Amino acid sequence: MLTIPEQTHNIIEGWIQPRSRVLDLGCGDGTLLNDLIEKKQVDGIGVEISQDMIVKCLGKGISVYQADIDRGLSQWDELSFDYVVLNATLQVIHRPVSVINEMLRVGRCAVISVSNFGYWENRVRILLKGCITNEMRLTGSWHDTPVIRFVCLSEFRSFLYDMGVEVLDARFFLPFDIAVMKTRTPLDNLLVKEAIFMLGRGK
């Protein structure tokens, strides 16, 4: 079975239309953007803060800006892109409201993945160990992890509703990394490990 990151990449590829304009925020080594360029012939640009990751992107021939996305996307005009992607990056940004607003300003659609801190395994780890473990932080100990923000699925959904953002599509990863299209039960916040949303501006 494919891992969640691999499935997430496949879902994003399925959502994005051929030859569209894509901005990938926190693009890392450019793996996703490179796949989109090769498979969907998109006009893609990455944004990354790590010099090492930028070198890897350039080695793949990807156009990439070195920038801190928390400072905004003022270099791009409104609706400059068809899709703006924030994959596996939400947990490390300082100003999520501003970043998501900017994504929906410069893009027609925003694609965001969310790791659910309310997932049952996380709750059990806290109950048994009495602390947030390295597995929950995704990497590193409390003093050197890049993760600064923990969010539950229910919180994120409420946040989108309050912002007036429209959910155009979504996928939810259940135990055993099974991806489903829709889930709306009282146990969502307990059973969903990770989710990925395609968002629109709303009305």
Image: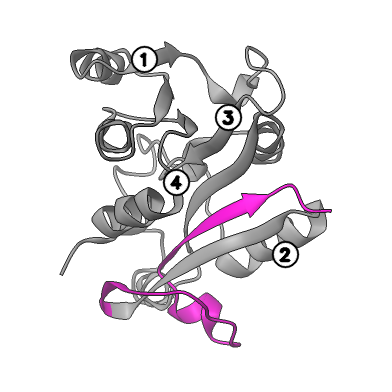
- The type of residue carrying mark 2 is Ser
Q: Residue at x 18, y 63 (%)?
A: 2
| Residue corresponding to mark 3 | 81
Distance from label 4 to label 3 (Cα)? 12 Å
Instruction: Name the N-terminal-most of marks 4 and 3.
Output: 4
Image location (x, y in percent) of residue 11: 37, 57
Give the residue drawn at x 55%, y 24%. 69
Q: Nearer the viewer, mark 4 or mark 1?
A: 4
Q: Secondary structure at mark 4?
A: loop
Residue 61: image x %, image y %? 24, 15
Density class for disc 2 (Cα within 10 Å; few <14, some 14-19, many ≥20) is: few
Q: Is residue 33 above or below residue 190?
A: above
The magenta segment: 176-203
Q: Amino acid at mark 1?
A: Ser
Give the labeled residue for mark 1.
63
- Mark 2 or mark 3, which is nearer to you? 3
Q: CA distance from mark 4 to mark 2?
A: 25 Å
61 or 94: nearer the viewer: 61
| Nearer the camera: disc 2 or disc 1 | 1
Mark 2, residue position: 158
Question: Observer-nearest residue: 102 or 168?
Answer: 168
Going from the N terminus, do you reach mark 2 or mark 1 first? 1
Residue indicated by mark 4: 16
Q: Are marks 4 and 2 in contact (CB under 8 Å)?
A: no
